[in-house]
Amino acid sequence: MNRVKTVLFLTALTILFIVIGGALGGRTGMYIALVFAGIMNFASYWFSDKIVLKMYRAQPLDPNSNHRLVRVVRNLVGRAGLPMPKVYIIPKNSPNAFATGRNPKHAAVAATQGILQILDDDELEGVMAHELSHVKHYDILIGSIAATIAGAISILATMARWAAIFGGYGGGDNRNSGGIFGLLAMTIIAPIAALLIQTAISRSREFLADKGGAEISRKPLALASALEKLHNASRRVPMQANPATAHMFIVNPLRGQGLMSLFSTHPPVEKRIAKLRDMSYGH
């Protein structure tokens, strides 16, 4: 079901781009916005492993070492049918983990010092299996595609907003679609709608990674227990995370309450745990 949701959300984002693009920027504006957004997100996608690992001062671990984290990942890659990724440790006490890299051959997984302190081996296996599931299903690529389309919509809206301020309409048939106030309203609504769809895609991929991680580790209850521990501990020891990278972590390092939860890149931990327990009990 979450795979279907991902396809539907990506389709909705594409349709939104076409409709909004035609209204705000015309065909030429659409192409310009897509090219700009594509260049920005292509660079992010291609160099994401280096960028985010450096951002969090992640330290590489010797793939031949007997380090606990390396040992756990090495035991999982065979079940996952993946090559051994690079393994990193992040010198932070807040417990969390993420995967990055443009494809399985250029992947990296990273975990904080804090996660090693509070999880047992079964729980750690569940967490790293979740991250390997992201790698296996090319979630970095899917996220980059969604970010490119959403970014193009945002660029279009900015172009149209400046055009409206200086007396232009940015192309298309905007002169007959509500005038300057309608145009300005659309430039505000369109990026919000795109962001809502983009975060919905991210939430669907998290559910899929939980399911994939439980299948790889064969321990859904251990992953459920890990998520509960990580959620509670990360509230006590918050992580100083860049909002642009928050979606990469297994639990959201940022807090979102009330309306802000609509823009969360992660589904509620309670729902994730419930789904994993259902898997364990064969429902």
Image: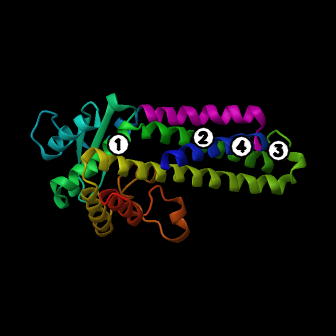
Element on which disc 4 rests: helix
Q: Nearer the viewer, mark 3 or mark 2?
A: 2
Q: CA distance from mark 2 to mark 1?
A: 24 Å
Element on which disc 1 rests: helix
Residue at numbered disc 4 = 159
**Closer to the N terminus: mark 1 or mark 4?**
1
Residue 43 sits inside the magenta stretch: yes
Whole-percent x and y of residue 165? 79, 50
Residue 78 sits inside the magenta stretch: no
Q: Nearer the viewer, mark 3 or mark 1?
A: 1
Q: Nearer the viewer, mark 1 or mark 4?
A: 1
Assign the magenta stretch its main secondary structure: helix
Whole-percent x and y of residue 215? 30, 46
Disc assigned to residue 133: 1
Q: Which residues are magenta?
A: 24-46
Residue at numbered disc 2 = 149
Residue extending farthest to the left is: 66
Q: Nearer the viewer, mark 2 or mark 4?
A: 2
Residue 268 vs residue 144, the one in the foreground: 268
